[in-house]
Amino acid sequence: MSELLGVAVLGAGHMGADHIRRLDRAVSGARVAAVADPDTARAEEAVAGIDGVSVHADAEAALDAPGVDAVLVASPGPAHEEALLAAFARGLPVLCEKPLVPDSSGALRVVEAEVRLGRRLAQVGFMRRYDAEYERLKSLLDSGRLGRPLMLHCTHRNVASPPHFTSAMLVNSSVSHEIDAARWLLDQELTAVTVLRPRPASNAPEGLLDPQFVVFETSGGALVDVEIFVNSGFGYQVACEAVCETGSARVGDERTMSVTTAAGRHEEVAQDYLVRFADAYDREVRAWVDATRAGRVTGPGVWDGYAASAVAEAGVRALENGGRVAVDLAPRPELYA
């Protein structure tokens, strides 16, 4: 493909607007061809200064707009299934932000639809796989230099949660990244979940169970724990330590800019995931554009999105009943073997 890849972006909110900027300014080989958002004024604002973009209130209208070759889904999770199936019906390659579909039954329907096509069309936006530190950790674990992985210790902290955030969303929205990262790093499925609930932090909104401590069991006998704290009040912090038979390795503590003034010296702490993982998002979208232009699909796929949704559902049940909940996964189709 010699011409620029024309991308329809569905959703012009925080994430969608950032992807629009990224496609226009940071990724070569692509252009924003159309944008859809029910709030067309927000969409118009997101594409201000970008030539040749059509704006639509309806997602399918954007898919049918002239010059659209591929789709980037950044709309709210409940809208993903319809958008993915519409893209599949048109044979359009898709990069879908997580979650693939919030509920596992819907995610499985997407898996089944892609299996009927007989080829992969969609990649899921688990951008941790494109973070340089996580990539180095994955390479180290795959090399076997540290022996068999025994445990992963994960930290995931946000400054503050959005007003609509619920206790369940700590697991099925925030921890979904750790779910995929653990599956990828260990090359194992997560088979059971337990959620422990310490006393809520004083700055957590009323009724929100924050923080939580999530423990996953894996098919290979490893354990994964995640501290999820979405109202820490001090920064966006993500870290992961792998403890293996003959050594350990930790990522996420990379130093940021140190600022010195008359008042003293301080180290800046990222306040947003778009800051901490800016390079990972750039690399993810760049890889998707390059693969799509070459007629290929790489990276995490719809099976990975389905698995994450199924594990998260088990996690929400564990949160609600306070016990250990087994993960129920459908048989893995040959397409994703």
Image (spheres, helix red, strand yellow):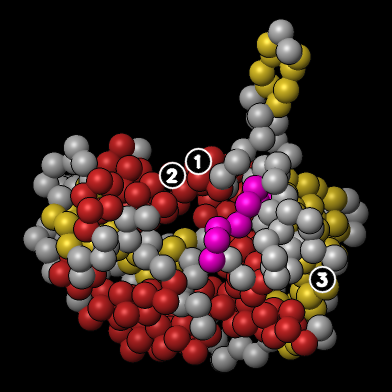
In this view, 330 is above or below 259: below
Q: Which residue is mark 2?
A: 282
Foreground of the two, 167 or 331: 167
Image spot of residue 337 (x, y percent): 52, 79
Of the residues shown, which amino acid type is indicated by label 1? Asp
Foreground of the two, 102 or 29: 102
Q: Which residue is mark 1?
A: 279
Image spot of residue 136 (x, y percent): 66, 46
- The kind of secondary structure the magenta stretch mainly shows is loop
Foreground of the two, 241 or 197: 197
Res. 288 image quadrant:
bottom left
**Mark 2 or mark 3, which is nearer the start of the sequence?**
3
Of the residues shown, which amino acid type is indicated by label 2? Asp
Res. 7 image quadrant:
bottom left
As helix, strand or loop, the secondary structure at mark 3 comes to loop
Asked if the residues shown at circle 2 and circle 1 are in contact, with their CB atoms under 8 angstroms apart, the answer is yes
**Mark 3 or mark 1, which is nearer the start of the sequence?**
3
Please give the label number shown on residue 197: 3
Residue that appears at 53% across and 40% down: 275
Residue that appears at 17% across and 62% down: 56
Of the residues shown, which amino acid type is indicated by label 3? Arg
Residue that appears at 42% across and 76% down: 78
In this view, 36 is above or below 222: above
| Residues drawn in magenta | 156-164
Kindly give the residue lying farthest to the top in the view shown: 262
Observer able to see residue 205:
yes
Please give the label number shown on residue 235: none
Number of residues whose C-alpha sits closer than 10 Å to that of mark 3, classed few (under 14), some (14–19) or many (20 or more): few
Q: Is residue 207 left or right of residue 23?
A: right
The span from disc 3 to disc 2 (Cα, nearest Å) is: 35 Å
